[in-house]
Image (tube, rainbow, N blue to C red):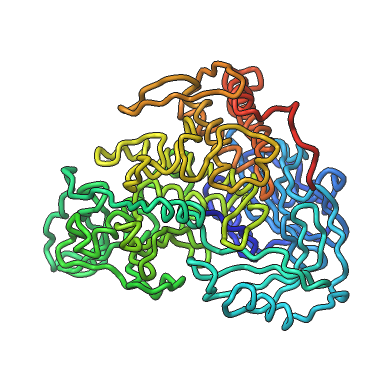
Amino acid sequence: MRRPHIRSVAVAVAVTTAATGLAGTAFGSPDTGTGQAASAGEASAASVVKAASSAAFAHASATGVSHGDELQATDVMIDPEGARHVRFTRTHQGMQVLGGDLVVHLTKQLAYAGVTRAAEHTVKPALATSAKLSAAQAEQKAASVAKGDAGSAELVVDAREGASALAYQVQVSDSGTTEGGSRTVVVDALTGKVRSNTPDSDEFLSPKVLDALRERGETADPATGIGSQAAGLAAPRSAAAVRYPVTANGTGKSLFVGQVALKTTQTARTSFLLKDPTRYGTETRDARGSETESFARGKKITTTNNIFGNGATSSRNSAAADAQYGVTKTLDFYKKTFGRKGIANNSKAAKAMVHWGNKVANAFWDPTCGCMLYGDGDGDMFKKPLVVLDVTGHELTHGVVDATAKLEPTRVDADGNQYGEPGSLNESLADIFGSNVEFFTNNVKDKPDYLIGEKLGLDQKFLRRLDHPSLDKLEGTIDYWAPQTYDTEVHAGSGVSSHAYYLLAEGSGQKTIGGVKYDSPTYDGSTVKGIGRTKATAIFYRALTRYMVSSTDFHDARIATLKAAKDLYGASSVEYKTVDKAWAAVNVTVANTPAARH
């Protein structure tokens, strides 16, 4: 489950895949020296950001920035054909603007080419001095509703959903109302009303689906066991010739993907650490049943023989082998497919902790920890750790979305279920790229498919599926858009864009892929011929990173994917036309675009 990422964070600016260290650069007014004469080859990240900031203020009527705003660059993307895109967050009168993110698009010559923005209005909140609540009162309110320990209240501007309200933002740790640990509460600074109260972790299984499983009395106990994939140990080294630590070739005997090769760190002649030096130092640790959100508190996982796990839950390291394998394969997918270096594209390690919490039937992406957290199952409904490959790909994709569009649900109910099209789109992207991680990995013990959670052992044989989403009866996933979709639970709503993606990739009707039978319907009875998974995935990734923002809904996503297809293949291409057909086939069209909600 996706939680709104609304805490203030420091993010290094990246050009394509190289970190540039521009975090903290703020722009408070138009700059006359835009550097627009710079050539494509000579344009540095700094000059691109400077040009984009100047363009944002020069085109204020389009971008929505105004006097008192400052822009913070969080990402710079330079396309092979020369276009530049700069993603900004903003502050107003020194206060963070929630829902104020935007992407400024530039030509190869650094001229303004357009904008994608979340807040479709000029932000004009009350002055900070007009707050009627004190910070202490806001903290007390937040602690009360989230049932935890409140941190310091920060004055912000809440510009989400068409608002322009002065508010306090408070992070609450050790919350008694969420399984993941902490929540972020936004309290109106004038009225004291709670504007939002959201979990900070992304849960794979929603409260809704867990309740549905309990009502059915269903248990999920997937088969596990050691597979036959070869993975050898490193050749013995002469102790006198080695300076530790060194990279070693280890073996993981996992629960779900068989026996697999793992790159590990040899720290002494007979000591091996589950840390991969070839992938930025990506590491898995053991949370030992705690609910810590601090990776440093996790126990390092070591062995004397460079073998991790035994293929069964009797070894704590078996789940760790699955986690490390899944995380590294997800990193490999993003790097080899898109050139993305790490989840945040900053060449930093991905992290995971297994055995998290006591009888936790879930898995999480936790932005506080910056890592994956895996529960062992509750021993009743879920009897195995949730370390399945597509679960990892799904959850780490939430991390990618956190680092790019930051798609947010529009509301959260008292039970923790989240609603709204931007949140549904986030869940869909996690399913789309999670499925792609399986296709990329192509593990014989977890054959790739367009099914999500098929190895969890559920009675319906999968949790969700992309070809015909409404076959998921657990969550009531939908196939097509309708006006009420805007307030649908995010996992149920995810079917709209997941279905559009499948139609774009594989087309409509019956098809067998890798031994799995699919039969994808269309809203209007049309026939869609797919363009292939490779092209469809490239279009959706480009749309996410260039043309989506925190408030992007399904109709916005249609426009984003059309822009991406035009960039990659041209406006007259078969690919562009098929994107349009795929969205029409799930009832997302120009004709039924809702009036602006902002």
Which residue is located at x 19 percent, y 63 percent? 314
Q: Pinpoint residue 527: horizontal percent, then vertical percent.
A: 54, 16
Decide: is 302 above or below 330: below
Using the image as rendered, state which of residue 374 and residue 549 is in the foreground. 374
Dividing the picture into quarters, in which one does residue 390 lie?
Answer: top left
Which residue is located at x 52 percent, y 62 percent? 201
Using the image as rendered, state which of residue 187 and residue 235 is in the foreground. 187
Dividing the picture into quarters, in which one does residue 242 lie?
Answer: bottom left
Q: How many numbered discs sit on the rendered protein?
A: 0
Residue furthest to the bottom? 136
The reply, left or right, for residue 514 in relation to residue 253 is right
Residue 277 visible:
no
Which residue is located at x 85 percent, y 53 percent? 122
Decide: is 545 above or below 289: above
Which residue is located at x 78 percent, y 40 percent? 112
The reply, left or right, for residue 544 in relation to residue 65 is left
Q: Pinpoint residue 291: horizontal percent, then vertical percent.
A: 42, 72
Q: Pinpoint residue 65: horizontal percent, then vertical percent.
A: 82, 53
Residue 99 visible:
yes
Decide: is 94 above or below 446: below
Q: Pinpoint residue 588: horizontal percent, then vertical percent.
A: 66, 30
